[in-house]
Image (cartoon, helix red, strand yellow):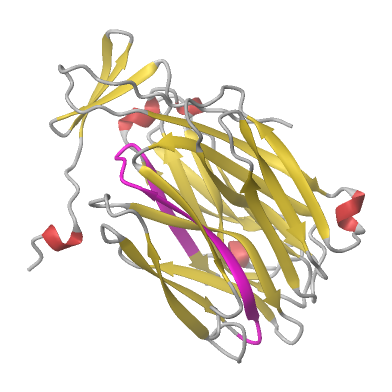
Amino acid sequence: MLYLIVILCIVNSSAQFGSEYYSEWQSGIDRTINKQSEFTNPSFPIRQYTQIVFPRRFSARPQVLLMHEEIQWSKGKNINYQTYVSDITINGFYINYVIWGPAIIPIMTVRWIAIVDDEAEIQYVQYSQEDLYQLRQGFGQRSQDFLISYYPKYPAPKVTAFIVGADFEIIDSLYTSIQIVMGIPTSSSMDVRFSTRDFCHVRSLTVAYFISNNYLTLAGSVGAYHNYFNQYLDNSNKLAIRAQKFTRIVPSIYTLEPGNNILAQGISGFDVNTQIGSAYLRVTCEPMISYSSTYTLIYGTRGETLLSYMQASYVLHPPGSPYHYYYKNYDWIVLKGDQVVLKEKVQEEKKISELNIK
């Protein structure tokens, strides 16, 4: 199993550089479920776990974020799966997989991020059948609103979400559908709306939320419907990978060691035909090259899957050692040893209530 490991260490600053920061980041990928016989010809329920060992132990017990980069399930049957973390220590943790069936899930690729960062928070929220009273029943377009709360210390937080478990009843539905719409985050909470359609009944949903106030960290969500401009969702070419690209500019800090940046992305919504064929969804990114200042997210499908909507989320972070990051007077100062290798102006972030909107 191959792990991509990126470690960020931000050391205490001297008085010369002002504010003090310290954080550690590591990332990797797990392909425990990859067409083995126990997953292609299963006996339900399936319970599997994988031990992840950090190549370099953390200084404190980290938070761990999971996201699904790739998943496939069989057509025409209810889908019920769950992934979660357990036994987190400074040396590693466990990823737990549970598949209740009856839909077969032969592929599930999980990316993880482990962090020790005072400016970031990770929450797992499981919405039960009792919570989802609008989505677990009925017909047509349905939605339900919730509120996600977090520690009130972030003046202008970045918030994103990933689906890491769900129970869909789709026997009478033409579509398996779930969409997450996030509102404008305040310093302590954010509205979130879940939507579905047709006879798709969402009986449970587990969402991993990532909240950060660190200027170095980028996070967000993107999505697209099939239309004239997005033919990647068309089912006419079953041999090709049909994908959509999303590109954003990143701060120049990300150009120091682009091959070592944390680039993590996962699935956060979809609308797929239930009866045509098996569903296959994948999210990935293009490797950042030297002097590159762009991050390119790729999300889509292949084969017989008929996809009419897909949504993906991402979390990005620049490389760490041997670089040290300091913050002073709205400037990021990056050192390699005693040498200043980059100095970047930071745009001041404010609460929504502090903005002068006329």
For image coordinates 77% across by 61% down, the residue present is 99
For image coordinates 8% across by 61% down, the residue present is 356
Q: Work out whether residue 169 or residue 294 is closer to the camera in this orientation and state it.
A: 169
Q: What span is colored magenta in the figure?
A: 198-223
Q: Is residue 273 visible?
A: no
Q: Main secondary structure of the magenta part?
A: strand
Q: Work out whether residue 62 or residue 291 is closer to the camera in this orientation and state it.
A: 62
The image position of residue 131, as x and y in percent, is: 53, 78
Q: Quadrant of residue 113?
A: top right
Tell me if residue 200 is in the magenta stretch: yes
Name the quarter where the C terminus is drawn: bottom left
The image position of residue 319, as x and y in percent, is: 43, 26
Q: Is residue 75 visible?
A: yes
Tell me if residue 166 is in the magenta stretch: no
For image coordinates 58% across by 50% down, the residue present is 67
Above/below status of 187 relative to 278: above
Is 312 positioned to the left or the right of 234 in the image? left
Is 204 positioned to the left or the right of 151 in the image? right
Q: Work out whether residue 282 or residue 165 is closer to the camera in this orientation and state it.
A: 165
For image coordinates 29% across by 21% down, the residue present is 12
